[in-house]
Structures are given as C-alpha cells and as structure tokens.
Amino acid sequence: MSLNSVITAAAALQRLEGVAGVMLFKGRNTIHRQMPFSEIRADNLREIISQMLDGYRQVRRSIRQIYLEFDGGTLLIVTQDETVMLFFLTSRADADLAASAASVMLNDHAATLDRLSRDPQPAAQRSPDGIEELVVTSPRALTQITEKAGTSVNQWGAVRQCVESVLGKVMGRAQAANLVQRTITEAQITDPYRLNASDVRKLAVKVIEHVPNTSKRRQLLVELDAAMEHLQA
Amino acid sequence: MGYYTDKLAETLGMRRLELAIVEDREGQTSISAAQQPGSWHGAVSSHRRSIKHVRESLAR
C-alpha cells in the first residue's frame, strides 16, 4: 500500500505559517515525521502522546483535538480514530487554520489510514518507490526552536522510563514522576536531554537516592543498573 | 493530564504548560495558568469554539 499521497499531504501542512514541525502517526507507526529535533526526542514525544490518548480511549472519551501551549512553543494534536496529526507551532502560527487543514487531510485519507497497522513499519515499506519530500521552512523559526530543543540529545527518555519502572516497585506512577521532576529541579537542570551520558546516569541514580529506606534503595540501584544495561551502546 | 504535559514539556526542553484546550465530541475543556504558580483557571463549553476565541476568553 503506497502512502505517498498521505505523506505528501502531511508534509504540505508544514508549509503553513508558523509551523516548525509535523508528525503523522498511528500508534507506534510513524507515517511522516519532520521535526526540528532528533529522532529520539520525536519518538519520545510520540510515545507520550500515544499514552495520553490511550488513557482517554480507556475512559471512552473520543478526543478530536488537544492544544497545549507551553512557555516556548505549542503542540497541536488533531486525531481521527487512532491516527494522530501532531504540529509543533511557533507563536506566529494560526492554530485554527492548522487544525482545520489537518482535519481535512485526515478525512481525505481516512480509508488509507484506517487500514494501517499501529506497529512500526520498516522505512522501505513506507515509501516503496522512493519518493522523498523536501520541506523548506523559515530558517528563523527553526533557529528559535532548535535553541529551545537542542539538536544533540541523549537517551534521557528511555532512562527516565527505566527510573520510573524501578521506582514503580515502591511508589505510585504519579509519585515517581513527581520525584523525577523534583530531582531535575533541585539539580537545576533545564533540559535533561542535553546532559552527557555520565550525567544522565548520575541524574538517574540521584532520583533513586531519594528513597529513604537503605536496603530498598540499594536494591533499586541494582535494578536500575540492570534496566539501563541494554541502553548502553 | 498534568503527568503527561510535564513529560511533554521536559521532552521539548520547556518549563511549563501555560494553556490547554481539550476538545471531544461533547465540547471543550480549557485551562490557563493563573499568575500564582500552581493555580489554574478554566472553562467547560458544550460548543466548539475556535482556539483563538478560547485563548482570548481565558486571557480576560
């Protein structure tokens, strides 16, 4: 099944004023991605958004659109069934226009998107005839975003998952997430994705060191080591 | 939702969420950060309003 027309339509949305990045995905299947930062960071973003939308599905809430304005940029999530069109917008963007264009695009390609798997697909199958889309965006917008997001990133997203999974044995998910956040704030780290590998590890250990019980803490540190072993490349 | 928006902010290298609008079949829920840290104000609407309109009404 050729996805060229879907990919071309998704890529065209990036040419709208103030759009710094777009990503079209269904579950773990990334159909098109053009984000102004690394693949790891974009994959983490997709993973978090998928989890959030799965949460809404579990309570049978049919989400059409989510607009999240952060201090340095905006995420606009437009959904149709299980397919998600994600925009990363600057302050110059017209979010209503982007949302409307995404809805039309998702509707136009609904039949194709409906047949797609939620599982990741090999890149070769996504574009069998090798068509590549060249997307040109404003250099100014990209500079603004890359200053915020950084171009070289580490494996913090995966490390954080390890830390939260290990902490999950002694506390709830929200409590674990708060503890990670508190440790980052205490250490005055503005962007953990920019730390070097050694500092990422130190940060992970520092989070676990907040566990007051000595024997539990020791046990969790051992488990953290084991969980992080497969991340070391 | 705060759990996920914290993670999204961290992934994007940003500090905090300032405004959120969630739209489903039943309508829109919107929240905006108040001046006091940790405080929010918001609205629930059964009508579908434009993002621009919601932003303006929350800014008032």
Image (cartoon, rainbow, N blue to C red):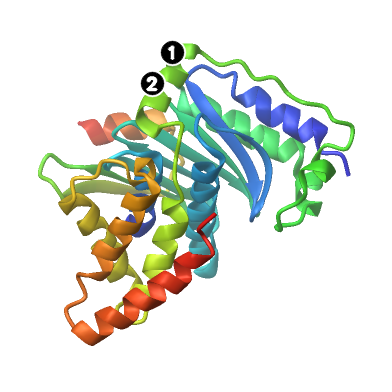
The amino acid sitting under disc 2 is Gln
Q: Are marks 1 and 2 in contact (CB under 8 Å)?
A: yes
Q: What separation in Å lies between label 1 and label 2 (alpha carbons)?
A: 6 Å
Q: Residue at x 47, y 28 (%)?
A: A95
Marked residue chain, label 1: A
Farthest-out residue, top: A139
Q: Which mark is residue A140?
A: 1
With A170 as the anchor, is A211 left or right in this view? left
Q: Which mark is residue A56?
A: none
The quadrant in which the C terminus of chain B is found is top left
Q: Residue at x 37, y 66 (%)?
A: A163
Q: Which mark is residue A144?
A: 2
The amino acid sitting under disc 1 is Arg
Q: Position of residue A206 (x, y in %)?
A: 24, 63
| Element type where label 2 sits in the image | helix
Instruction: For label 1, count other residues whose C-alpha is less than 10 Å away and answer few (under 14), some (14-19) or many (20+).
Output: few
Q: Residue at x 39, y 55 (%)?
A: B4
Is the residue A232 above or below the residue B8 in the image?
below
